[in-house]
Image: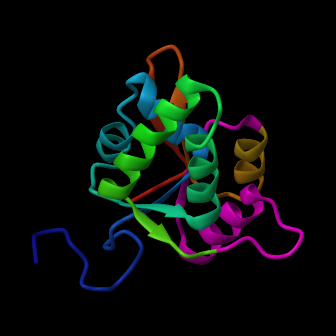
Amino acid sequence: MQAGESSRTSTSSRRPIVVLDTNILMLLAHGVRVFDDISEALEAKPRFVVIKPVYNELRKLANSSEAKTRRNAEFVLSVVEKLCEVVDYMAKNGETVDDAIIRYALENNAIVATNDRELRRRLRSLNIPEAYLREESMRIHVEGYYK
């Protein structure tokens, strides 16, 4: 154990979990360094998680009739399959994908990475840490997570 480290198990001694939303993942197709920026902001290598409803949204986009959307989604899916853990975590009856993301984050003390304003508002009201794109710097910023 290093000097200053605690021997007790806590969220600070475990790898942070980051659950990713569809819209933040689609930023990958536009050159945003989502994974690197989040890792740098957390000063840790987190577990990147994509729940099944988000994965299914990406698959739907990959089958789009719009060529650019299809290409972007196929690229994002290839990155997700390499760098993320796709978790078989489904939305319950009557739940939206956002509801399932929030439930997963609450159950797993996860950070939610999204650029959806309404979802971000809900995250803040529930004190769930969030990662989002700061447009002025074009970098991902993390708020509400404390090591």
Find the magenta span and give its range: 90-117
Task: Answer yes or no: is residue 21 visible.
Answer: no
Position above or below: 133 against 131: above
Name the residue located 51 percent from the left edge and 13 percent from the top edge.
Answer: 136
Position above or below: 98 against 137: below
Q: Position of residue 129 (x, y in %)?
A: 57, 53
Name the residue located 38 percent from the left edge and 59 percent from the top edge.
Answer: 84
- Identify the residue at the far top of this view: 136
Which one is nearer the viewer's eye here, 104 or 60?
Answer: 60
Residue 49, magenta (yes or no): no
Tell me the quadrant of the picture where the C terminus can be found.
bottom left
Please say which color scheme the image uses.
Answer: rainbow
Q: Position of residue 22 (x, y in %)?
A: 59, 45
Asked if residue 91 lies left or right of residue 43, the reply is right
Residue 95, magenta (yes or no): yes
Q: Quadrant of residue 118?
A: top right
Task: Answer yes or no: is residue 38 visible.
Answer: yes
Asked if residue 47 lies left or right of residue 145, the reply is left
Which one is nearer the viewer's eye here, 119 or 14?
Answer: 119
Q: Position of residue 50 (x, y in %)?
A: 51, 60
Name the residue located 10 percent from the left edge and 78 percent from the top edge.
Answer: 1
Q: Position of residue 106 (x, y in %)?
A: 64, 71
- Identify the residue at the far front of this view: 65
